[in-house]
Amino acid sequence: MTQIELNGFLLIPSIYIQIIAICFAVFDKLVAKYNLPYWRISERTFIKVAFLGGWPGLLLSFFVLHHKVSYRKRSFQIKIFFAILASFLLKQFSLDVFRQIDKGLIALFGKGEGEVKDL
């Protein structure tokens, strides 16, 4: 499978996490609405999925399904917001670190294949 990049971000794993996030939200909404005899998806799981990058799918499905958007769920919404913020910060920090490592490796070994700088 080929990997598609957009500004340094891999999109294929991101698409998978979006699908998982939407499936979790739909399943939890169905269990809640119809009082099905299954366990609900915990808020902690939703927060972890949002942190791992599934927040667009979660937010979209929450608003489309009217799930976890009432005023009674403000504490959950605040936790999701901080998970999204932490995800952005971690992604930005890791990209900066990898760019610095890449610059260092290019400076040490050269840019082309097979080129090695003399130390």
Image: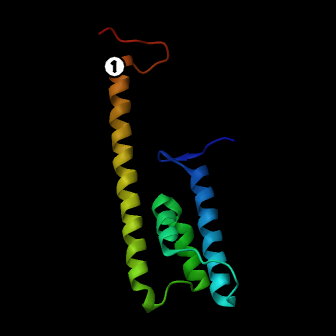
| Percent position of residue 31, x then y | 66, 83
- Tell which of 75 and 107 is nearer to you: 75
Judging by the rendered image, the residue that carries numbered circle 1 is 108
User: Number of numbered discs present?
Assistant: 1
- Tell which of 74 and 93 is nearer to you: 74
What residue do we see at 39% from left, 58% from top?
Answer: 88
What residue do we see at 70% from left, 85% from top?
Answer: 36
Name the image quarter holding residue 3: top right
The C terminus: image quadrant? top left
What residue do we see at 44% from left, 86% from top?
Answer: 73
The N terminus: image quadrant? top right
Relative to 81, is 70 above or below? below
Relative to 58, is 52 above or below? above
What residue do we see at 65% from left, 89% from top?
Answer: 33
| Percent position of residue 8, x then y | 47, 45
| Percent position of residue 17, x then y | 58, 59
- Tell which of 111 and 48 is nearer to you: 48
User: Which residue appears farthest toward the left when viewing the image?
Assistant: 119
Q: Disc 1 residue type?
A: Leu
Relative to 104, is 45 above or below? below
Q: Residues within 10 Å of mark 1 (few under 14, many from 20)?
A: few
Horizontal placement of 77 versus 30: left or right? Answer: left
- Look at the image and name its color scheme: rainbow
SS state under label 1:
helix
User: Which residue appears farthest toward the top when viewing the image?
Assistant: 118
